Image: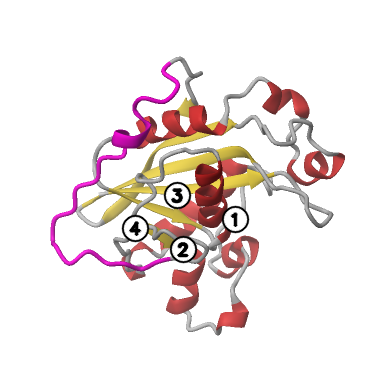
Amino acid sequence: MTYIVYDLEMTVRRKRGQVAEIIEIGAVKVEAEGGIPREVSTFQSFVKPVIVPLLTADTTAFTGIGQQDVSGAGTLAEVLRSFVEWIGPGEYFLCAWGPDDQRQLVQECRQHGIPTDWIVNHNNLQKMLSKIFKLEKHQQMGLKNALEMLEIPFSGSHHRALDDAQNTARIMVKLFDKLQFKRNKITDDAKVETEVVYKTAHFENLPFAGLAGLFPGQRPPQEED
């Protein structure tokens, strides 16, 4: 089974009415064979914002991402096509820390007419950790605190997509035998997470169906094996 642990970085909103846009996607692919998970590959790509193309000083200060990083990057549609190709054609679970990344991803895809049929089997690892340790809803734990609690050293830089995805993946790997992943799909109103569990034992998911025809000349992602 394949698990895709991903993280998004967005532009910073300081004023009412400002729009947040995805400017970086980072992800770790974890394969589990015989119940033993291991990291096998990573994905990282900057994304060119199109509604407000110029990054603010707040965004650069918060993320460390500069204008030169995003100006030459692909659009969200182009980057997502590369991302889905990197994920591969088999069944997978999408995993993120907290609900915000899924919400932002779905919102922007719908805003720009990008297919969302590949956003399936989405699991909130923050919520899963809270359930394992019996935390109350108001005790949702941040990534940094979760790493400290589990005695996992943080590596990389905070608020960079690949670094945060890798640290999140380490939490998933450490707690793997305690986690219960759910198969689901987004609804027409995806402002909140859904938990529509498929009743069949076999699940087939063809993420290329929606994205295969988009932007065939896009720039390939930066990968590490």
First of labels 1, 3 by sequence position: 3
Up/down of 94 relative to 74, above or below: below
First of labels 2, 4 by sequence position: 2
Contact between labelled residues 3 and 4, with CB atoms less than 8 Å apart: no
Query: How far is the residue under mark 1 from the one under mark 2?
Result: 21 Å
Query: Which residue is found at the position 74% from the left and 31% from the top?
Result: 53
Label 1: how many Cα within 10 Å (few below 14, some 14–19, many 20+): few
**Which secondary structure dominates the residues rendered in magenta?**
loop
Up/down of 28 relative to 96, above or below: above
Please, what secondary structure does the residue beneath circle 2 have?
Answer: strand
Label 4: how many Cα within 10 Å (few below 14, some 14–19, many 20+): many
Percent across and percent down for residue 223 are 47, 27
Query: Which residue is found at the position 53% from the left and 48% from the top?
Result: 105
Query: Which residue is found at the position 72% from the left and 47% from the top?
Result: 19
Query: How far is the residue under mark 1 from the one under mark 3?
Result: 18 Å
Q: Which residues are magenta?
A: 194-216
Give the residue pinned by disc 1.
153
Q: Residue furthest left?
A: 201
Q: Nearer the viewer, mark 2 or mark 4?
A: 4
Query: Which residue is found at the position 67% from the left and 32% from the top?
Result: 50
Query: How far is the residue under mark 1 from the one under mark 4?
Result: 33 Å
Up/down of 77 relative to 146, above or below: above
Give the residue pinned by disc 2.
124
195 within the magenta span: yes
Q: Nearer the viewer, mark 1 or mark 2?
A: 2
Query: How far is the residue under mark 2 from the one under mark 3?
Result: 10 Å
Label 3: how many Cα within 10 Å (few below 14, some 14–19, many 20+): many
Please, what secondary structure does the residue beneath circle 1 have?
Answer: loop
Q: Nearer the viewer, mark 2 or mark 3?
A: 2
Q: Nearer the viewer, mark 1 or mark 3?
A: 3
First of labels 2, 3 by sequence position: 3
